Amino acid sequence: MRERLLLVDDEQSILTFCTRTLLPYGYDVRSALSAEAALALLGTERFDLLATDIRMPGMSGLELMRHALDLRADMAVIVITGMGTFDVSVQALRAGAHDFLAKPFGASQLLQAVEHALQQARLIRETARLRLLEPLLALSQQALYNRDVESLSRSILQVAIAQTKATGAVLALSDPGMTFSIRLSAEELRGCEQAFAQSSGQVQVWTPEALGISDAERGERNGTPRTLVHAPLTAPRGVVGHLVISLARAATQLDQSDLDLVSALAGQAAALLENTLLMQRLEEWNRTLEQRVQQRTQELEAAQERLLRAERLAAVGQFGSSIAHELRNPLGVISNSVYYLNMRLGDADEKLRKHLDILTREVQASNKIITNLMSYVRVGQLHTQAIAPSNLVMEVLERAQIPAQVRLVTDVPEDLPLLSVDRDKMHQVLLNLIDNAVQAMPHGGALSIRAYIEEGTLCLAVADNGEGIPRENLERIFEPLFSTKARGIGLGLAIVKMLVEAHGGTIDVVSQPGQGTTFTLHLPVCVRNEVLQEMCA
Amino acid sequence: MTQPPSPRHRLLIVDDDEGMRDTLVDILESLSYIVEQAAHGQMALERLRAQAFDLVLMDVRMPVLDGIETLRRIRQLQPGLPVILMSGNTGEPSVETVRQEATAILAKPLDLPKLMPLIHAMLSACGREE
């Protein structure tokens, strides 16, 4: 970019000489015949160098220089002095001028002074830029070791305020939605949000008025002007947030280097925050991934165990079932024989009678085991029919063997809705539960069978007041091959559960050790159509 | 149930298990029935062609000719003959196919205290018809 020079002298000949000398060297040269005219130009245009005569009518060169440096601190300044004004030159140098030219001067002196002053101004700018690197480096280091977005954001704000001599600043992140601010009033923050909304993607300078911030709210004191500089935080994926700094300077007093500074800060802030957020998310993702892997592994192990168990049980079941099949015929024959003996030995003595009874009882017990073993392998087809719960219970009680020391209590109202169940299978279910209840009361007790409606399902509860089931066994009693009985292979309740579930029902158990156990079946009741069909059939 | 039916009814037991046949024969004979036996369906059909029976008690699973097929053939010969099927698996689909043809289907193991009155009732019913 061509460097822009502003020459100020009340003598046109000097201006002409200087312009002609400098133009061939590629400088963009403007000139003014008075300090006032120069100041007007400085207010509207950017210049890299000001060369001004000291003694002029009206505003002096020294005063012009001060105004110029106020507007832009890194501007190069050369003062031009007449004869015998050495003191003034020293004064000018002290006030910030980079070089001076004593009249009369030649072309080479002019060129040398301009080059020298520009060089100095460049050095000053570079130094300022380098000085910014230090806090930015510190920020980067912090971001490397600290994954906390909030503390990083606050550090960025502090650096921004320190570097731009701001009165306050705000940093807003869009995702996650977070806003951090330092020394800004509520109204200023609201104004900043307007600035975010109207973001052009570039650094923008706002007056408080343009953002609807009133004088009182922005705390203007002694007529100090205010300006808000807004820079979007731009990351590769787009605008990820906004940085606004509030300056105690008028917009016209800001130069490109101020905006560059804010822009550089915003760029750095975007990169650091984005990295921190990504790292945070990565860590988070890692954690959840680890958890998921663990969870899936556990699920997989459990599934594998279930599968193994199911396979083992199926194998045991198959084996058991074939044995049961083989045993059923000989047992049937024994049963027939016992029946025959009973028929023929009606007048047998007591001892013989007792043994016939033992045979009968044991054959029945064996038949139960065989039936259970065989039903474990397959539930088989259900032949459902509509049955009144009271009839079902009555039929079962006819078949059940309830010892004399067990008192039977039934509460099965006759007007309950009909059940749609497989009669034989439901007999098996209830007989198994009654058997269990009886066995839980070796010294007698009360067996209760109740039926009632609860939440639209028919409940059949079989309860005993026997020894109860220890808590640690309660979860396992429906598992196949789990048994705590001296006699029993642990299929009874597994089959009960299987059959109840095949009917679309559920079973639950409540037990208090020492007080008894209640098994409750929840069975779907017959819907009206089914009842009608059954009745018509 | 132990009262002797009169005139004496002739029963055919069809089962491949010899023990089952023997015990059923003894029980039914002691109830004054005349009882014949066959080890499979083919043999049963031969007996039925040779002689008149009042009731057949037949197993489902048998070698040579099973109870299902035998029942179908019996129905062609004597539609009105009471035939009680005995099945270890009453839910078996093949048993379902002859539910209409069978006079009764009983589950194994047999519940003899129920079977005996059933036989008696069937024979009395047929007797009245005759």
Image (tube, rainbow, N blue to C red):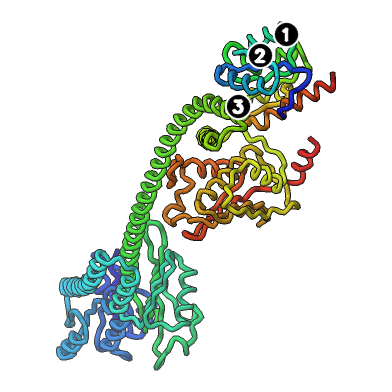
Residue labelled with disc 2: B36
Instruction: Estimate the x, y position of residue A173 in percent, counting from the top left.
Output: 41, 68
Assign a secondary structure to mark 2.
strand
Tags 2 and 1 on a common chain: yes
Q: Quadrant of residue A411?
A: bottom right
Instruction: Estimate the x, y position of residue B56 in percent, counting from the top left.
Output: 69, 18
C-beta proximity under 8 Å, tags 1 and 3: no
* Direction right: furthest residue: B129
Residue at horizontal 74 percent and vertical 27 percent from the top: B3
Residue B80's label in the rendered image is: none
Output the chain of dot 1: B
What separation in Å lies between label 2 and label 1 (alpha carbons)?
10 Å
Q: Nearer the viewer, mark 1 or mark 3?
A: 3
Q: Which of disc 1 and disc 2 is earlier in sequence?
A: 2
Output the chain of dot 2: B
Amino acid type assigned to the residue bearing label 1 in the image:
Gln
Residue at horizontal 44 percent and vertical 57 percent from the top: A471
Residue labelled with disc 3: A340
Instruction: Estimate the x, y position of residue A336 in percent, counting from the top left.
Output: 58, 26
Residue A250 in sight here: yes
Give left or right: position of A1 versus A423. left
What separation in Å lies between label 1 and label 3 (alpha carbons)?
27 Å
Instruction: Estimate the x, y position of residue A148 in percent, counting from the top left.
Output: 32, 68
Residue labelled with disc 1: B51
